[in-house]
Image (cartoon, coloured by chain):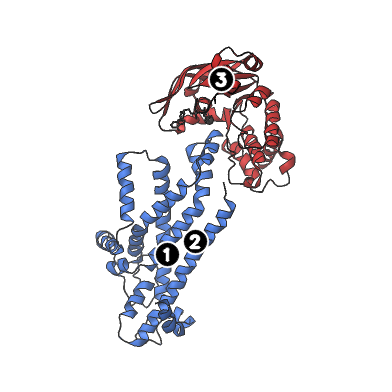
Amino acid sequence: MLWDAWDKGADWLSIKFLTSFPSRFPEEAGIKSALMGSIWLMVLTAIMSIPMGIGSAVYLEEYARKSILTQLIELNISNLAGVPSIVYGILGLALFVRGLNMERSLISGALTLTLLILPIIIISSREAIRAVPSSIRDASYALGATKWQTISYHVLPAAIPGILTGNILALSRAIGEAAPLLMIGALTFIAFTPESIFDPFTALPIQIFNWASRPQAEFQYLAAAAILVLLALLMTMNAAAIIIRNKYQKNLKW
Amino acid sequence: MTTVIKTINLNAWYGEKLALIDVNTEIEENKITAIIGPSGCGKSTFIRCLNRMNDLVDIFRYEGEIIVDNININDIEPEALRKNVGMVFQKPNPFPKSIYDNIAFGPKIQGVKDKGELDSIVEQSLKKAALWDEVKDRLKDSALGLSGGQQQRLCIARTVAVEPEIILFDEPCSALDPISTSKIEDLMIELKKKYTIVIVTHNMQQAARASDYTAFFLDGKLIEFGDTKQLFRKPVEKSTEDYIIGRFG
Ligand SMILES: Nc1ncnc2c1ncn2[C@@H]1O[C@H](COP(=O)(O)OP(=O)(O)OP(=O)(O)O)[C@@H](O)[C@H]1O
Ligand SMILES: [Mg+2]
């Protein structure tokens, strides 16, 4: 499939392809609005999901008392991580687009993606926090540090590489998702780049989906080229995650 | 002589398990008190009561009184107690940070902000731990690059940096080679001029060499407590004698 995309799409890749808006004429068409939409989505989703995810992970791991309630919450989080993404799309449609009247805007899309990846972020951040050896905490407490000082000076910095890796991987999942965005009604033909978070938007997977479902061969090639761009984006993110992990693994041996 | 630590009818539990039974001790200022006894007899539990490190174990609880500097330790904040009663652990546990940051952390959380003052605390602490000459040119390097013995002395320097009055050592040499061990012993004898020291050890020679008083624990009970020379030469209890000549443990 990868080869197929390369074969069909490589010739269509050009600066013009990246900087033009979609068009009825394949030669004119580009992914500017989709690429910008995806970047907007990624940034907004990151801004919302990362602090919330890490905060929840710290709370659950360090502060929450073990009770039936917290066990229930934990069970739910692991279950939510396994729910198909289209279900989040339905939720986003009901909650943000209709319920909160946010329309089919970037913010609705980003909130939906945030819901989608929050469980993954919480789970991977908790694992990273749990991997910090207790001897580090003991050392900190024994010097008279409070719980919060111990967490902020020692536990979080030691867990940050693991947390970042998990978060980047979660974000790259969000970037590749089409189903929940289609569900909340992201448009496919957008001839402008979003100016604010309340603007309508499109995103790479949606543009790909749209082009791929057209009969003309040229649009198939456009879809293939857009797939290549999306793949490049995903691979860059995954590479960043791996580099971060390796870099810190070398420094952190205990 | 002044008593700095006193325990009265100390009983301690992990869940249902009784780990210390009616332990009464008086620990003297500027002396080294060694705690000996077979594995699982409650040595670590005892010293971790003294700085409330056991509070971090959910299922732990105790009854009785623990008095440090004439104050019941429950009457002060655990953070204030732990600043005053420092602890060095069995396995060297430096923070995965620079040598400098390892030592500066304690003073920083006590509110020392001035860079010059921190620099001087770092230098003084490393000197007190007999580590300064070995690391003075690489204070910014990671502490994890030091040898095990150096790491343990760094942990001592880090403890000294917050100016405690008492330092608890839980088998500080069990992960170290003989040369590092003797360095740490010399260091403790030097440190007792300023600090009161309590050390858990499995090494009878170490207890005999370095300590002034020795306490022998067995199955959670304090069996015998007295002058080290006396206890090793003429133990009163049969079980103490059996232990120090190596019949069990
Ligand atoms: N966190 C804990 N939870 C449950 N039981 C514990 C815990 N820590 C210690 N114990 C139990 O309490 C008893 C005393 O343990 P302690 O660690 O004080 O022994 P110790 O004399 O220090 O032994 P060692 O020489 O092996 O370090 C042991 O039976 C041990 O199993
Ligand atoms: Mg022990």
Q: Which residue is mark 3?
A: B216
Relative horizontal placement of residue A46, taking residue B195 as reference (left or right) = left
Q: Which amino acid, mark 3?
A: Phe
Q: Chain of mark 3?
A: B
The answer to which of A145 and A6 lies nearer the viewer is: A6
Report x, y in % for residue B108: 59, 39
A205 shown above or below B109: below
Mark 1 to mark 3 CA distance (whole Å): 60 Å
Q: Which residue is mark 1?
A: A172
Q: Which mark is residue A192?
A: none
Residue A115 visible at all: yes
Mark 2 to mark 1 CA distance (whole Å): 10 Å
B222 shown above or below A56: above
Q: Earlier in the sequence, mark 2 or mark 1?
A: 1
Q: Residue at x 54, y 17 (%)?
A: B239
Relative horizontal placement of residue A138, taking residue B179 as reference (left or right) = left
State the SS at label 1: helix
The answer to which of A33 and B220 lies nearer the viewer is: B220
Q: Nearer the viewer, mark 1 or mark 3?
A: 3
Report x, y in % for residue A197: 37, 65
Q: Which amino acid, mark 2?
A: Ala
Specify the chain shown as red: B
Q: Nearer the viewer, mark 2 or mark 3?
A: 3
Q: Which residue is mark 2?
A: A241
Q: Which amino acid, mark 1?
A: Ser
Q: Chain of mark 1?
A: A
Specify the chain shown as blue: A
- Callout 2–callout 1 Cβ contact below 8 Å: yes
Q: Residue at x 41, y 60 (%)?
A: A170
Q: Residue furthest front?
A: B247
Mark 2 to mark 3 CA distance (whole Å): 53 Å
